[in-house]
Amino acid sequence: MDVSTKLKLLCLLFLPFTGCFTTLNAQKKTHKTELQIENENPQVKTLKRKVAIARFTNETQYGKGIFYDKENDPMARQALDILSNKLVMSEKFLLLERSDLEKIIEESQKNGGDYTNVGADYLIVGSITEFGRKNLGDANLISRTKTQVAEAAVTIRMIDVKNGQIIYSEEAKGQAELKSKSTLGVGSSADFDATLSDKAISAAISKLTENIISNLMDRTWKAYFLTVDNGDYFISGGKSQGIEVGDEFLVKEKGRIVKNPQTGMSLELPGKQVARIKVTLSEGDNPQNEFSIVEFLQGSIDQENLDNYYIEEER
């Protein structure tokens, strides 16, 4: 056996082991790459906006009998609960209660509490504008198909409470269906399914939720100075809004208020940056009692006119 043949045989014998080593090395390299990607793309910090759902109404004629109570419409309350749940689950907002606010205040007074209502940055107003159900059937010589369909349309408006302006409005439609089929009398059957109504409304609201979140997060987060005490500057906002020690923000002086002759509305001109601050302490566990203390890294402000300034996240 010549030398070249022996070399070929040795390569064949060690090829499986070489392949294993190559695979292990490839896995290690892949794992390392994933870690590098995770380190290179850290999770983006989110400062929570304060949002409240002012109302949700049912503007359709569905379910409105003689004893209908507009204040306790089950479909309207269901839509409000669905939207509230989806906004809370996004973990991007502080959702403030408005629909049962009187009950909260009443219970707070019974417990000797001093409930302070917190103002929202944005209000959401919504309504169910369309709702209906229908049954579709298809029958031939050997088979029969029946489909229950529920359809809903939901409209929402988002309002900037600072000036009462509608900043976003949209309508979405959702549908849910249940199908049954039988062949020669054998197959599935389905009675009236009341949950289709819920699913249709939820489907419509789901289409709106992502746009609501995107629209709100595109708007700059703001906070304000509360007071100055022994040289410490206190600002609004704390842990519940995502503020942490070490966070840095811009301080801007409010722009001049002018009246737009075209719309008749007052307009605040863009603010001018005057300072940069850093959070040194963040206290409180809810929007009612939380605050943060900051120090100035650059610039300064007039302590006697704190209302002339606002704090803004740096984008």
Image: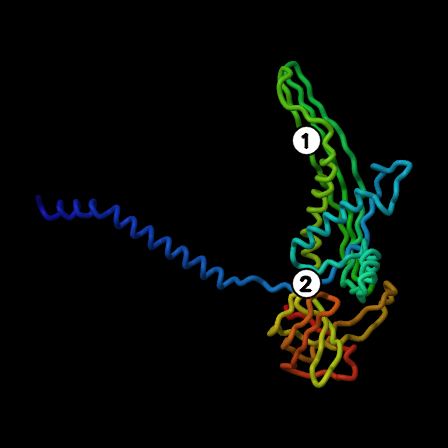
Query: What is the three-letter code of the residue carrying label 1?
Result: Leu
Location of residue 260 with respect to 70 vertically, above or below: below
Identify the residue at the far right of this view. Answer: 66
Q: Which residue is tagged 1?
A: 178
Q: CA distance from mark 2 to mark 1?
A: 39 Å
Residue 288 visible at all? yes
Q: Quadrant of residue 137?
A: top right
- Residue 185 or residue 305, whichever sits in front: 185
| Residue 38 placement, left or right of 165 | left
Residue occupying the point 20% across, 45% down: 13
Q: Are marks 2 and 1 in contact (CB under 8 Å)?
A: no
On residue 48, which mark appears?
A: 2
Q: Position of residue 93 (x, y in %)?
A: 69, 59
Tell me, what colour scheme is on the image?
A: rainbow
Q: List the single residue furthest toward the front.
A: 111
Q: Position of residue 314 (x, y in %)?
A: 64, 70
Rendered residue at 71%/49% (across/down): 208
Along the polypeptide, which appears first: circle 2 or circle 1?
2
